[in-house]
């Protein structure tokens, strides 16, 4: 009987308290972009933009440029202690109102960690020493969640993402987890890297139950389809991007019109065209449509579990997957320009996975609108055109016209067998 009752809008509005707005997630919620996590993306990630519009405090573990972290589909580098003239890695700032502190913040409200899987949010915690030279991911986790406790030799608690969020006693929690699993599967071409729905649901239930038991309001996001990102481009569209006839990609590299070309392959093919010499590309440069379909299906299955888990826990759902799909198929109008999901289309940063500032502002407005509808609030939305004017990603453009002609491409010959 009680479970069937719905609260009136006025009661919902009273229930929404943004005093402790806590965010759990991976690289997207952390603000990773252009292959790294640094202050440039963190200060204007979508949770920070939301906090600004809601008038909520939102301390973050800001990493000074050039930042840190392992980026998917690029060679990993060992972790190193900063050398002169760099004096620190982390800076401690308060988003609203802007404030810079001299020492470590006692707490953070964005506990998102790039490359974190859902299971990691429940199990991985900082581990001494601070720097793990051969484990960049552990080093990053230490830098983000280990302060100030790792400054002391005493027996102090070192928390997982979920434990940290619980300790902050959130009044409003946002959960953005599962995207890294999908990206990892797409980059590796291995759908099995996406968790089985039952195991994923069990972990997701645990996260929501632990957040909700303190009467926190919770918003969860669905997982975007990695095939909707700018990392993978259909073969013919890849040729258009490279401003070359489609047969260069299809004939030269043995792909079909249904295959996908990776971001890394776009770079390499472009370099080979400049050198006028086609050469075989490394493994992972292309993705077969059958594999892409399996990845899409598995991501949809996880989103079904997220939606059901949220319903059972009384949490709200924002369909982030639908937004990324809309950006891919329709684009979003920002001022005089339509932002698209193509590579250099204005939404995604150079890594092809994570948005630039304008993309984050679009996400922030979408979730703010959900909060306004659900809780009868009136949080102001961001001025997208104003933000885009300061966004280097938004300024990126593809070449305006066909660059290579038939006469320029007399060197094109098949260089590798058709992909399996």
Image (spheres, rainbow, N blue to C red):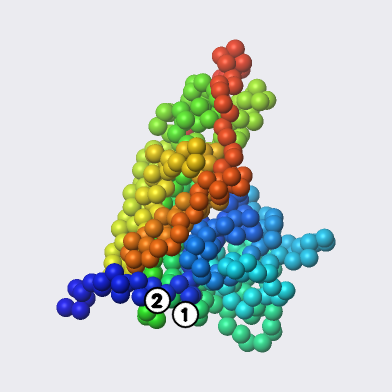
Q: Which mark is residue 411?
A: none
Foreground pick, 11 / 104: 11
Q: Sequence-wise, which precedes: disc 1 or disc 2?
A: 1
Foreground pick, 264 / 343: 343
Above/below status of 315 relative to 196: below
Rate crowding at label 1 as few (under 14), some (14 to 19) or many (20 or more) other CA atoms within 10 Å: some
* Residue holding disc 1: 169
Outermost bottom residue: 154
Residue at (56% x, 32% y) in the render: 398
Residue 104, picture quadrant: bottom right
Residue at (42% x, 47% y) in the render: 324
**Can residue 290 be seen by looking at this rendering?**
yes
Are the residues at dot 1 and dot 2 in contact (C-beta closer than 8 Å)?
yes
Above/below status of 402 relative to 190: above
How far apart are the alpha carbons under marks 1 and 2? Answer: 8 Å
Residue 59, picture quadrant: bottom right
Apparent side of residue 309 relative to residue 47 in the rendered image (left or right)? left
Foreground pick, 32 / 21: 21
Question: Please, what secondary structure does the residue beneath circle 2 have?
Answer: loop
Outermost right residue: 84
Where's residue 25, x and y in %? 49, 64
Residue at (60% x, 55% y) in the render: 41
Residue at (39% x, 81% y) in the render: 214
**Can residue 192 be seen by looking at this rendering?**
no
Foreground pick, 342 / 285: 342
Apparent side of residue 273 relative to residue 188 in the rendered image (left or right)? right
Where's residue 172, x and y in %? 43, 72
Where's residue 266, x and y in %? 56, 34
* Residue holding disc 2: 216
């Amino acid at each position: 009987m009680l479970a069937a009752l719905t609260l009136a809008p006025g009661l919902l509005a009273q229930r929404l308290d943004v005093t402790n707005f806590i965010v759990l997630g991976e690289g997207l919620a952390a603000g990773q972009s252009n292959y790294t996590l640094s202050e440039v993306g963190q200060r204007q990630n979508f949770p920070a933009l939301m906090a600004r519009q809601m008038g909520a405090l939102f301390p973050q573990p800001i990493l000074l440029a050039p930042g840190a972290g392992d980026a998917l589909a690029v060679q990993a580098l060992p972790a190193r202690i900063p050398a002169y003239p760099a004096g620190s890695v982390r800076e401690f700032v308060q988003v609203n109102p802007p404030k810079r502190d001299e020492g470590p913040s006692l707490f953070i409200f964005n506990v998102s960690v790039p490359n974190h899987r859902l299971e990691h949010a429940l199990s991985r915690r900082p581990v001494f020493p601070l720097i793990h030279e051969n484990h960049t991911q552990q080093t990053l986790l230490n830098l983000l969640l280990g302060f100030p406790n790792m400054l002391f030799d005493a027996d102090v608690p070192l928390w997982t993402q979920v434990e940290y969020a619980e300790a902050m006693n959130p009044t409003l929690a946002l959960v953005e987890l599962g995207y890294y699993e999908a990206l990892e599967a797409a980059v590796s071409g291995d759908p099995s890297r996406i968790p089985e729905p039952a195991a994923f649901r069990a972990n997701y239930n645990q996260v929501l139950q632990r957040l909700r038991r303190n009467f926190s309001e919770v918003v969860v996001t669905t997982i975007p389809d990695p095939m909707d990102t700018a990392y993978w481009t259909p073969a013919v569209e890849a040729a258009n991007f490279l401003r070359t006839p489609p047969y260069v990609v299809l004939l030269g590299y043995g792909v079909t019109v249904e295959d996908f070309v990776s971001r890394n392959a776009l770079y390499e093919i472009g370099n080979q065209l400049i050198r006028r010499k086609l050469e075989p590309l490394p493994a992972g440069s292309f993705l077969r449509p059958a594999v892409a379909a399996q990845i899409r299906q598995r991501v949809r299955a996880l989103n079904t579990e997220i939606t059901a888990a949220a319903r059972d826990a009384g949490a709200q759902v924002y369909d982030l997957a639908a937004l990324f799909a809309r950006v891919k198929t329709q684009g979003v109008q920002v001022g005089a320009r339509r932002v698209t999901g193509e590579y250099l289309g204005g939404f995604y940063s150079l890594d092809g996975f994570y948005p630039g500032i304008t993309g984050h502002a679009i996400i922030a407005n979408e979730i703010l609108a959900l909060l306004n509808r659900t809780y009868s609030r009136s949080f102001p939305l961001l001025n997208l055109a104003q933000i885009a004017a300061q966004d280097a990603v938004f300024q990126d453009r593809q070449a305006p016209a066909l660059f290579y002609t038939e006469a320029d491409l007399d060197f094109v010959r098949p260089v590798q067998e058709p992909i399996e």
